[in-house]
Image (cartoon, grey):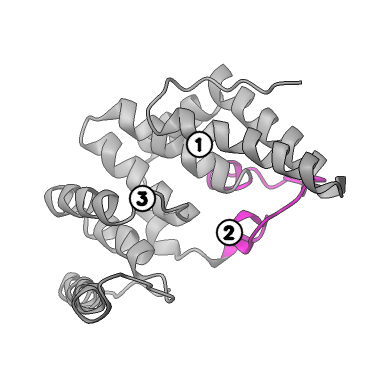
Amino acid sequence: MEIPVTEKKIKQRISSYRSALKKEIETYGIISDGYGKRYLLFSLYFVLNDLEKSAEYFEWFEEEFPADVGEPGMYLSWAVSLHRMGKDRDARIKLAMLLLSNIYFIPQLLGDIDIKKEDMWHSSNYEEIDYFDYMPDDIFKEISSSEKEWIKTVYQSDDFQKMKKTHIDIYGELLHEKNVEKRKALVDMSSVQWLHLYGMPIDVVKND
């Protein structure tokens, strides 16, 4: 996605996407959104830096898509916006969701150029090491040095590193495991991470 160059055009893009999503509800009773407009709106609001409108959209999104798996760029915009609002606990949770959606994304954001692809299962293109390259630079330009320092501090914390290791361990096993029941058990273990983030303290337990 290319971010419009003017504030007016960004607002027009937002209005167009919101209208399209509203029309889907009115026409079909649900939002299918194969294009991913619901994700792109996070980035548009972020570049616009309208925290009030962002907060309104976050609330709407959580009501409409309570179980949505999300997308890395969405979680980045969401996390930093919440940090700007002074809601650091919620911001940490969204940053953790970013970590789980793509383990390479935060290190790349922080300038790590020596990242290697992990020997693990990547369930979608969102999780691939090169997904970061498809993100609009406009989003990264809007993140200040102090905000990057906050991201770095949170990312390097014991909680986050433990979460990352657990994710890599589980998905490493999923890459090679062929037994259906064992794969299901591993997927369930992965789900535990997300369940903690949806209402429990950020602490991950992997059962042996």
Tell me the crowding category of disc 1: few under 14, some 14 to 19, or many 20 or more residues within 10 angstroms, Cα based: some
* Viewer-side label of 1, 2: 1
Which residue has dot 2 on it?
126
Which amino acid type is marked by label 3? Ser
Question: Which of 24 and 88 lies nearest the eye of the viewer?
Answer: 24
Q: Residue at coordinates 52% horizontally, 20% vertically from top-left?
A: 203
Left-right relation of 57 to 194: left
Which residue has dot 3 on it?
77
Which residue has dot 1 on it?
194
Rounded to the nearest whole Å, what is the CA distance between mark 1 and mark 3?
19 Å
Which amino acid type is marked by label 1? Trp
Q: Describe the element under mark 1 as helix, strand or loop.
A: helix
- Image coordinates for residue 33, horizontal then vertical, percent: 37, 73
Task: Give the magenta range.
Answer: 104-133
Quadrant assignment for the C terminus: top right
Magenta-span inclusion, residue 166: no
